[in-house]
Image: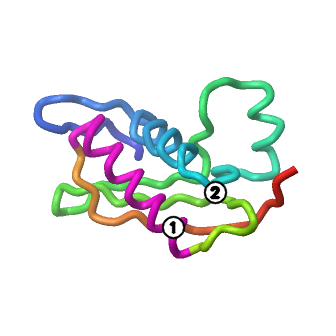
Amino acid sequence: MTNEMNVEGLSIAPGVMETIISVAASEVDGVASLGNFAASGIRSMLVSKPSTSGIETKMGDDGKLYVAVHVEVYYGYVLPELAAALRGAIAESLATQAGVDVSAVDVYIDGIQFKS
């Protein structure tokens, strides 16, 4: 998202939606990481702020938000169930915290990790 979004008289700065999405996704059981996977392990050691890479948002003509997330998941989880849990968590977090209606959440599973 490149510009501020206005929701019911509230201006939301770029990056706020992505942070809400990142936190919601990281709380779903089975999600190993979000975004740029080559640097995610190093980045998480250096920075306490959640990564927002791998998240795309855009406002539709209908005033609803479209979300796409790229994740790596842990081996052993049923992928369609995990994707459904991600969609629900992201849509609920955005509705609760920002008052934004979500038209769609597309989940891209880019890899599988093994728990160490």
List x then y, in percent, for residue 12.
Answer: 30, 31
- Disc 1 or disc 2, which is closer to the eye? 2
**Which residue is at a point 54% across and 65% down the rendered structure image?**
82
Residue 52, by quadrant, is top right
Q: Main secondary structure of the magenta part?
A: helix
Q: Is residue 93 magenta?
A: yes
Way the structure is coloured = rainbow
Classify residue 52 as left or right of residue 56. Answer: right
Crowding at label 2, few (<14), some or many (≥20) Cα neighbours within 10 Å?
Answer: many
Identify the mark at residue 19; answer none if there is no mark: none
Q: Amino acid at mark 1?
A: Ala
Q: Is residue 17 above or below residue 116?
A: above
- Residue furthest to the right: 116
Q: Amino acid at mark 2?
A: Gly
Q: Which residues are magenta?
A: 80-99
List x then y, in percent, for residue 17.
Answer: 39, 40
Classify residue 66 as left or right of residue 71. Answer: left
**Which residue is at a point 78% across and 25% down the rendered structure image?**
46
Q: Is residue 98 magenta?
A: yes
Which residue position holds label 2?
30
List x then y, in percent, for residue 114.
Answer: 83, 60
Secondary structure beneath dot 1 equals helix
Secondary structure beneath dot 2 equals loop
Q: Is residue 106 above or below residue 97?
A: below
Report how far apart the C-alphas of labels 1 and 2 lie in the structure. Answer: 10 Å
- Residue furthest to the left: 8
113 and 65: which is toward the camera: 113
Which residue position holds label 1?
83
Classify residue 105 as left or right of residue 53. Answer: left
List x then y, in percent, for residue 94.
Answer: 32, 44
